[in-house]
Image (cartoon, helix red, strand yellow):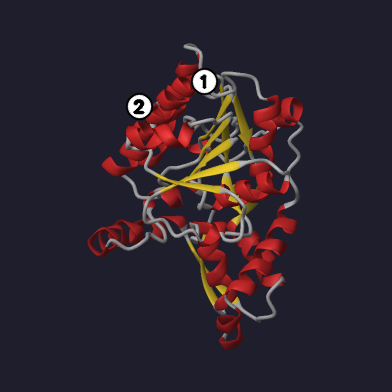
Amino acid sequence: MNLVTGATGHIGNVLVKELVKRGEKVRALVLPDEDLTPLNGLDIEIVKGNILDKSSLVAAFKGVDYVFHLAGIISIMPGKDQLVHDVNVNGTANMVEAAKAARVKKFIHTSSIHAFTRVPHGIVVDETVPIDPDSAVAAYDQSKAEATLAVLNATKNGLPAVVVCPTGVIGPYDYKGSEIGVLIQEWMLHKVNFLIEGDYDFVDVRDVVQGMILAREKGKIGQIYILSGELIRVIDLWRLVKELVSIRSSFINIPARLATFVAKFTQFYYKLTRSKPRFTTYSIETLHTNAVISNSKARTVLGYNPRSLRSTIHDTVSWWKQQIPHLLKKS
């Protein structure tokens, strides 16, 4: 039996689909009020609970062999955030404790490339880069670093765990609309787009899932595996999307300094309205940090082999076309 937390999320629902496709048993731990649309039609067991509630984890872990821990909060807001810390750090600690008690065969923890300390340009980011919560630039980075260290420390006390660190996840089945997913959707709909200078490493959600399953099968206890894809400039990503959408359009390139200045004010708007941030000083800074990332270890040890980003964008655009056909007709 596989227990999957965060099963309705982007990576989570794709993972569940793949495990079911393989004929494996899956139990999804979901919040009591969770929208289960991403899991519709799948022959799986649903358990209501919360990783912050230890008592609710008892039933979730009964008879479980493997745990894929994905539940967490992604945030691009700078500064401190108590909820992000509670869910990502304390929630993971509860999962680790429950996994130990249940004596699971393997615990696959999904962290993030943001768990690693940011290093200067010219240095390749790989698993030798330190993980230091104290050097984190934002609440999300700090929470992923703390949670990762907690899992790794638990392996010294008997937890059979491995950690995977994806880069920017992109791809179809993005039901909840990730930051990059919503951005691609907007590029598809609008004839004029505002682009921020920068680049980043993006990886197909289906390749992340394959990497996670490979980590379960071949990953060494106490080890981290980076699941990266392909480094691409924002403008080139935009061009890939536009190639696949029959809309003649143009873009306005916004210099990083101007975007950062504007973002300082829009962040207050996001906080006041409690709306989902579109771009922040943190996300802009991320586009200008060192994103030369190596997945050599995952390739060598796990047999990880991500597809081309062009293929990913093709499938992503095709999926969004199915989700928003009425809007595309109006654009």
Tell me the residue that label 2 is attached to.
134
Question: How much space separates mark 2 and mark 1, taking CA atoms?
Answer: 32 Å
Image position of 259 (left or right of 324): left
Q: Give the position of the N terminus as an image quadrant.
A: top right
In the picture, the quarter occupied by the C terminus is: bottom right
Give me the residue at 41% from left, 58% from top. 279
Q: Nearer the viewer, residue 289 or 328?
A: 328
Disc on the earlier residue, 2 or 1: 1
Farthest-out residue, top: 157
Q: What amino acid type is highlighted by mark number 2?
A: Asp
Residue in view at x 34 percent, y 32 percent: 90
Q: Is residue 203 above or below residue 241?
A: above
- Tell me: residue 25, above or below residue 299: below
Q: Is residue 239 above or below residue 331?
A: above
Q: Secondary structure at mark 2?
A: helix
Q: Residues within 10 Å of mark 2 (few under 14, many from 20)?
A: few
| Quarter of the image where one finds residue 301 | top right
* Nearer the observer, 238 or 221: 221
- Is residue 172 at all visible to an observer of this figure? yes
Circle 1 residue: 103
Q: Secondary structure at mark 1?
A: loop
